[in-house]
């Protein structure tokens, strides 16, 4: 026994031994992979103001292993920080808040580096706007409107993503300002399989035609993957109807046709593969098409002349566009993955490899186009791991996402998205009203140098004043005074208080948005998110 | 200024943010709410909150509750700290690996947050009786186990007092429950006896579907099939480490062995994609997890605890789902109480059987139906005023003696129409009464 154990031990190849880092990050690597993690680990995030909301946001970035953080904060730790901020302590009252928060945050993960700057933000913006260039992303909390607008302009011009996070009483707010964000791996939750039954490629067609359902014995018949069953009955159907079933009625008839092919098993049960085929009719017979968002992106790519500054994403999109309009005859490259189906191993794996090979062939076509474009741009434009990147791009072609952002200045000064505002303000359930309230308290602050209700003895007067601000704001947007007084009262009740559980909620959300931006995986919001802790609801608005 | 006055001023300054919510009236408060400086004092002096689980959600919950002003917190957890917890369970450090989670979490909070006192219990929730649970005003759950959730739900329901069929409101201990998986999560408020409970919505947690054994054995197609083949069939046959040694998912030698054999099997069938990470994921049934989702869900739960304790805002009604993989999505709705819920309805459960059904068929109904999803039910019948054990899983001697009953029919066991069967299971602290109804 001992001998066996020993031989097993030495038989374990070194590659199996996970690094300590892989073990520590295992649960998240299953979400964004080693490549996502690598991007996170070279990310450098700047946090402006280590308030409760600020430190809660950083916490969910330090834990998963962000590369580095820089905190800008000129405040000193006060008593009220010890009542809502986990990353200060009683002993540090009076010390620079950025320093204390940084020290306590970095304790969470020794792999993260950090610095702090004990200097007013306005000073940095005035004297050294280039300060921000090293950052992958900037997070800002607790800024008055005028400073926020200056910051947002600096970062927009420098093409550095800005995430504004805020908690105000029971309300949370996130605003992302990013010029353009492209996502290859958006990880959609429910994917429609790409089976090409309406336009089988020749290898698939050849293989399908080589199979004869009627000639199979019962065992083989009950182990034919459903994609074959659908193919065969679709042929039969098309002979009679000329085109695949389109509407509900035709699909129902088609299902009946499929059922005629089912043999009864000895046990009296249905053949599972036929049951699966029936279930798959709805999704698998949809015509192969390009999702509208991807089509928009391809149209944009069609107008691109690749230059040395063109992002690899757009060069690949350009090549993809060329594929669609020639080789692909109007559709995207074959995805190359198929869902699991009840089947014998041999047929399933054969079919799987047919799809996979076709995907590789299509991706290869795209790769050659990408290479041609790159060569024209000169030797400097060599992309590392190009082949894998293009493969990955083609595999995800149906789920590509592009976000076009809008500067905060534009939203604040002139061209806010009025149709979005109008539509939501008419809906009493919409949380957009809290956005209006947040904008109004900012205007209030600009005017009176304090937030409404900040001082206990001024709550009543502030209610009247805030109402003026709200109505002025709505009038600027051309909306009537449709905000109920309840919201104004509630806002004055808050008096700009930063309550921990609201800060923790919105900080967690904001941190994940930053991770999405840094890893270029999953899809960030565009562009404003409001959390309403009163009703535990939320909404995302394009403003 | 005297020391006492100075401390009071500091106390006031420290909690100034949360005091605005507690000391000012507002249009969205609960009708019971009375703005007062005493509310925070009441929270700190009188309210006892029990946190179940000191993992991803539990760590967050303790921090959140402490910083909302609660000072009397208790935490139960039976686990110890593992390296893979450190990417999100932020109260733990590398030096703490192997120590009880509840203990380390409590130590950390007590040290960081002045005046907060967390009491820890390195225990299973089943180690405590109703006296223990009755001593809390609120219970918050951050668990990954559905069985444990169901058990605590059953416990809080068992504490309800009814007088003449009317629920005594003071016996209601609210349960706030959170759960996460990757970028998805949910938070809910349960008022036992008043709103839908965990068992009302059991169909939200369908049992995990296993691959059919014949697929694993004969027609593998996926890398997971190959790993399951090694785990379920090859391991017990070859016993690679020693006779009867079960698989330890944390032992890299075990995992490496499974990984290699699965790779070989995959190669035989031309299947690609068996990796070490996948092997580990399948063997240990790993659920992906990330810091941010735990932070969000715990915070949502804590907000609800705060509302329930202070009435400063009306509680959420009553179920919220969250997903931030594509944008940030939430959906909040009222989960309805099930009229004939097995746990909270007071309606006797009917067990519809044929005289020819065997006892094992009845047990299959209890374990397989989405409605009951029991694990190892033990059954006792009340026949002619006497308790008759039909089947029990333990002790082994009794199990052996009762085992022949499994093959006996309802008729042979003398289970007539209207006979009551008490069913005990790990999913509930109390037995569930079923009334036999014979199919005509
Ligand atoms: Zn119930």
Image (tube, grey):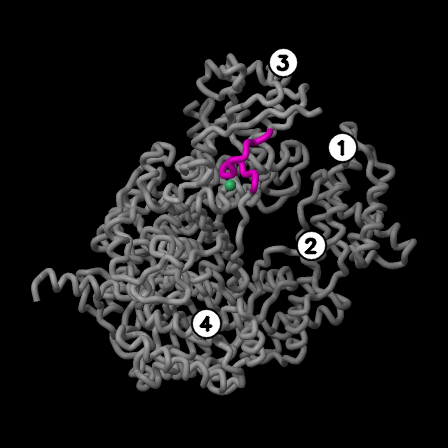
Give the residue drawn at x 53%, y 58%: B331
Image-quadrant location for residue B125: top left
Region in magenta: B339-350
Q: Which residue is mark 1?
A: A269
Q: Which mark is residue A434?
A: 4
A509 relative to A491, above or below = above
- Dot 1 and dot 4 within a common chain: yes
Question: Which structural element holds mark 3?
Answer: loop
Tell me the chain of label 4: A
Calculate the distance from the C-alpha at mark 2 to the C-alpha at mark 4.
Answer: 40 Å
Q: Which mark is residue B412?
A: 3
Question: Which structural element holds mark 4?
Answer: helix
Q: Is residue A61 left or right of residue A361?
A: left
Q: Which residue is mark 2?
A: A193
Report if the CB atoms under discs 3 and 2 are less than 8 Å apart: no
Q: Position of residue A220 (x, y in %)?
A: 78, 35
Question: Which structural element holds mark 2?
Answer: loop
Question: Which structural element holds mark 1?
Answer: loop
């Amino acid at each position: 026994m001992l001998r066996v154990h020993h031989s097993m031990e030495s038989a374990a190849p070194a590659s199996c031994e996970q690094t300590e880092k892989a073990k520590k990050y295992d649960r998240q690597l299953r979400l964004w992979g080693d490549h996502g993690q690598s991007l996170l680990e070279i990310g450098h995030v700047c946090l402006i103001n280590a308030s409760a909301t600020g430190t809660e946001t950083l916490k969910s970035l330090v834990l998963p292993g962000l590369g580095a953080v820089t905190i800008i904060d000129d405040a000193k730790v006060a008593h009220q920080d010890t009542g809502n901020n986990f990353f200060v302590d009683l002993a540090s009252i009076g010390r620079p808040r950025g320093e204390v928060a940084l020290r306590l945050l970095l304790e969470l993960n020794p792999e993260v580096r950090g610095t702090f700057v004990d200097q007013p933000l306005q000073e940095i913006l005035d004297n050294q706007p280039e300060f921000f260039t090293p950052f992958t992303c900037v997070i800002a909390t607790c800024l008055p409107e005028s400073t926020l607008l200056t910051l947002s302009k600096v970062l927009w011009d420098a093409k550095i993503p800005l995430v504004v996070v805020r908690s105000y009483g029971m309300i949370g707010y996130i605003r992302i300002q990013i010029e353009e964000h492209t996502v290859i791996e958006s990880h959609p939750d429910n994917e429609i399989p790409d089976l090409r039954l309406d336009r089988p490629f020749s290898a698939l067609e050849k293989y399908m035609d080589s199979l004869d359902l009627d000639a199979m014995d019962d065992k083989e018949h009950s182990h034919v993957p459903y994609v074959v069953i659908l193919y065969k009955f679709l042929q039969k159907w098309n002979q009679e109807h000329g085109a695949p079933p389109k509407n509900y009625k035709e699909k129902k008839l088609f299902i009946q046709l499929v059922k005629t092919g089912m043999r009864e098993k000895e046990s009296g049960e249905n053949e599972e593969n036929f049951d699966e085929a029936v279930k798959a009719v709805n999704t698998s017979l949809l015509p192969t098409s390009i999702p509208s968002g991807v089509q928009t992106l391809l149209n944009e790519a069609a107008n691109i002349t690749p230059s040395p500054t063109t992002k690899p994403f757009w060069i690949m999109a350009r090549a993809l566009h060329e594929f669609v309009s020639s080789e692909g005859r109007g559709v995207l490259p074959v995805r190359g993955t198929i869902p699991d189906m009840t089947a014998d191993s041999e047929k399933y794996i054969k079919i799987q490899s047919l799809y996979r090979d076709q995907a590789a062939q299509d991706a290869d076509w795209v790769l050659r186009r990408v290479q041609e474009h790159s060569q024209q741009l000169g030797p400097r434009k060599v992309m590392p791991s190009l082949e894998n990147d293009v493969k990955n791009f083609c595999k995800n072609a149906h789920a590509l996402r592009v976000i076009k952002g809008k500067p905060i200045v534009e939203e604040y000064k002139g061209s806010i998205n009025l149709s979005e505002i109008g539509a939501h303000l008419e809906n009493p359930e919409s949380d957009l009203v809290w956005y209006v309230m947040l904008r109004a308290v900012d205007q209030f602050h600009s005017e009176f140098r304090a937030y409404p209700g900040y001082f206990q003895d001024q709550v009543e007067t502030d209610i009247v004043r805030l109402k003026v601000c709200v109505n002025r704001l709505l009038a600027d947007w051309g909306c009537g005074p449709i905000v109920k007084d309840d919201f104004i009262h509630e806002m004055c009740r808050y008096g700009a208080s930063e309550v921990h559980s609201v800060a923790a909620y919105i900080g967690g959300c904001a941190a994940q948005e930053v991770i999405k931006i840094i890893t270029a995986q999953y899809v960030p919001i565009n562009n404003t998110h409001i959390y309403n802790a009163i009703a535990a609801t939320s909404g995302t608005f394009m403003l | 200024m005297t020391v006492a006055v100075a401390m009071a001023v500091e106390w006031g300054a420290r909690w100034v943010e949360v005091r605005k919510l507690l000391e000012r009236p507002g249009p969205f408060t609960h009708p019971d709410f009375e703005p007062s400086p005493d509310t925070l004092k009441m929270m700190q002096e009188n309210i006892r909150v029990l946190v179940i689980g000191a993992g991803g959600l539990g760590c967050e919950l303790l921090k959140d509750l402490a910083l909302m002003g609660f000072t009397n917190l208790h935490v139960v957890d039976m686990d110890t700290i593992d390296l893979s917890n450190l990417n999100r369970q932020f109260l733990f450090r590398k030096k703490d690996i192997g120590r009880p989670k509840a203990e380390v979490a409590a130590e950390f909070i007590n040290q960081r947050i002045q005046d907060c006192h967390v009491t820890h219990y390195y225990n299973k929730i089943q180690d405590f009786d109703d006296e223990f649970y009755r001593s809390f005003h609120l219970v918050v759950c951050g668990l990954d186990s559905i069985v444990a959730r169901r058990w605590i739900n059953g416990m809080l329901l068992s504490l309800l007092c009814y007088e003449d069929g009317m629920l005594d409101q003071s016996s209601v201990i609210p349960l706030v429950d959170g759960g996460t998986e990757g970028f998805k999560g949910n938070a809910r408020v349960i008022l036992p006896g008043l709103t839908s409970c965990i068992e009302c919505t059991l169909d939200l947690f369908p049992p995990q579907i296993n691959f059919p054994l014949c697929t694993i054995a004969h027609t593998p197609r996926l890398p997971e099939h190959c790993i399951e083949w090694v785990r379920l069939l090859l391991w017990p046959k070859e016993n690679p480490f020693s006779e009867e040694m079960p698989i330890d998912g944390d032992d890299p030698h075990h995992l490496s062995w499974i990984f290699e054999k699965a790779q070989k099997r995959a190669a035989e069938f031309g299947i690609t994609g068996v990796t070490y990470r996948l092997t580990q994921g399948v063997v240990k049934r790993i659920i992906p997890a990330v810091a941010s989702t735990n932070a969000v869900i715990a915070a949502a739960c804590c907000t609800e605890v705060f509302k329930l304790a202070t009435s400063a805002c009306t509680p959420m009604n009553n179920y919220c789902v969250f997903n931030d993989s594509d944008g940030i999505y939430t959906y909040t709705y009222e989960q309805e109480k099930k009229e004939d819920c097995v746990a909270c309805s007071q309606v006797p459960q009917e067990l519809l059987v044929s005289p020819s059904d065997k006892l094992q068929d009845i047990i299959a109904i209890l374990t397989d139906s989405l409605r009951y999803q029991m694990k190892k039910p033990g059954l006792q019948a009340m026949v002619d005023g006497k308790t008759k054990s039909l089947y029990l899983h333990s002790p082994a001697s009794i199990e052996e003696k009762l085992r022949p009953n499994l093959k006996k029919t309802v008729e042979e066991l003398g289970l007539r129409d209207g006979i009551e069967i008490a069913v005990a299971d790990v999913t509930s602290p109390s037995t569930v009464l079923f009334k036999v109804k014979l199919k005509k």
